Image: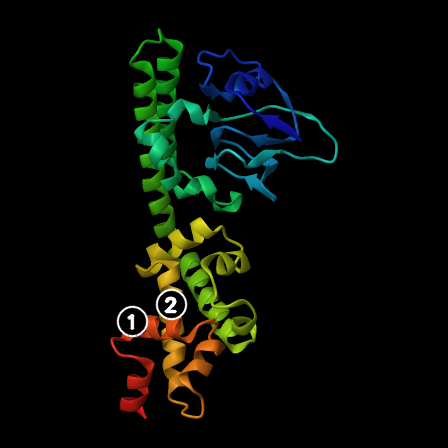
């Protein structure tokens, strides 16, 4: 596996000129053929794929692109084209790549971690309409023109502002994707409900504690970021809030069984310390578990 450490290296692999040492925008129809292999990126990269691209690997996942798709890669992630034997392939679409130092100390440098799609899995990529693609390509072309022109003291901030605009569009497009996939999202929510039901019917709470968002996302084959965003869009609650509400719902039923102490119920639900359960219950219900039992039994 090769490390991708600089913009110059990224451009050289594709046979393209480097206009700025820390930032590039490429029309990949102008790139030369490249060897298919995985890379460990130290750059932020945004790929716009406009035709089928088989066996593209992102992290440990393979993804076949159909149509216009955006994929976001952040430093520390693996991407590339994998095949049994290395072969030459023609890159397609558009791509933006920039080193973290390019945005360091700027507003974008401080906020880029708030764009969760840089940490989504490949099968959670953004699929764009023709209109959305036009907006994205137009934005990329303007950045490219700025980089290819005479670089002055204003160039960096103009380019960074354009990247922020692009990321704002992508946030809007992801919101649209959550809406247009409403039926699929409801299926995920149903599977989430079933997962929590089975979890609390098993011995897992006593063995590994209360379920985390990361655990649930992994079981449902999502990244924690995408899963959290999906649940928030579908229910108005964070995934963590949803789990806590489910714990309270289950605990109310168990509190009615007076053969069990409140502490036993807390341990059964995965709490290592019963006072933590009591605190959560009182926060959500307004009264303690003991008080709830006294007025309900």
Q: Which residue lies most toward the top here?
A: 150
Q: What colouring style does the render use? A: rainbow
| Viewer-proximal residue among 33 and 73 | 73
| Number of numbered discs visible in the structure rendering | 2
Rendered location of residue 286, percent (x, y): 24, 75
Measured as percent of width and height from the top left, residue 83 is found at 70, 35
| Residue at image coords 29%, 14% | 154
Q: Residue at x 53, y 29 (%)?
A: 42
Q: Find numbered disc 2 in the image and state the secondary structure of the residue it sits on.
A: helix
- Residue farthest to the right, as pictured: 85
Q: Residue at x 45, y 60 (%)?
A: 188
Give how far across and how far down residue 80 sits, in percent.
60, 32
Residue 180 in picture, x, y percent from top left: 37, 50
The quadrant the N terminus occupies is top right
* Residue 34 found in image quarter: top right
* Residue on which the image places disc 1: 284
Side of 58 where 98 appears, left or right: left
Disc 1 packing (10 Å; few <14; some 14–19; many ≥20): few
- The relative height of residue 144 versus residue 75 in the rendered view (above or below) is above
Residue shown at 39% from the left, 17% from the top: 144
What distance separates the C-alpha of mark 1 from that of mark 2? 9 Å
Q: In this orientation, does residue 287 appear?
A: yes
The answer to whether any part of residue 131 appears in the image is no
State yes or no: discs 1 and 2 in contact (Cβ < 8 Å). Answer: yes
Q: Compared with residue 70, is residue 7 higher up or lower down, i.e. above or below? A: above
Q: Which mark is residue 244?
A: 2
């Amino acid at each position: 596996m090769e490390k991708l450490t600089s913009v110059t290296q990224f451009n050289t692999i594709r046979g393209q000129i480097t206009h700025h040492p820390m930032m590039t925008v490429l029309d990949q129809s102008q790139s030369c053929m490249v060897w298919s292999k995985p890379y460990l990126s130290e750059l932020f990269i945004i790929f716009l794929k406009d035709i089928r691209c088989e066996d593209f690997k992102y992290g440990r996942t393979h993804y076949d692109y159909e149509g216009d798709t955006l994929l976001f890669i952040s430093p520390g992630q693996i991407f590339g084209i994998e095949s049994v034997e290395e072969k030459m392939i023609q890159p397609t679409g558009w791509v933006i790549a920039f080193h973290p130092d390019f945005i360091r100390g700027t507003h974008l440098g401080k906020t880029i971690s708030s764009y969760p799609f840089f940490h989504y899995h490949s099968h959670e990529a953004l699929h764009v309409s023709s209109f959305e693609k036009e907006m994205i390509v137009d934005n990329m072309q303007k950045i490219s023109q700025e980089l290819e022109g005479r670089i002055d003291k204003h160039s960096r901030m103009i380019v960074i502002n354009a990247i922020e605009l692009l990321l704002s569009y992508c946030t809007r497009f992801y919101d649209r994707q959550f809406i247009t996939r409403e039926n699929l999202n409801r299926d995920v929510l149903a599977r989430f409900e079933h997962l929590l039901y089975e979890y609390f019917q098993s011995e897992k709470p006593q063995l590994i504690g209360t379920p985390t968002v990361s655990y649930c996302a992994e079981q449902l084959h999502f990244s924690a970021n995408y899963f959290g965003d999906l649940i928030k869009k579908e229910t108005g609650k964070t995934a963590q809030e949803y789990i806590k509400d489910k714990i309270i719902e289950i605990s109310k039923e168990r509190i009615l069984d007076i053969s069990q102490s409140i502490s036993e119920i807390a341990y059964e639900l995965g709490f290592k310390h019963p006072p933590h359960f009591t605190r959560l219950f009182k926060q959500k219900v307004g009264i303690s578990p003991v008080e709830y039992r006294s007025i309900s039994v």
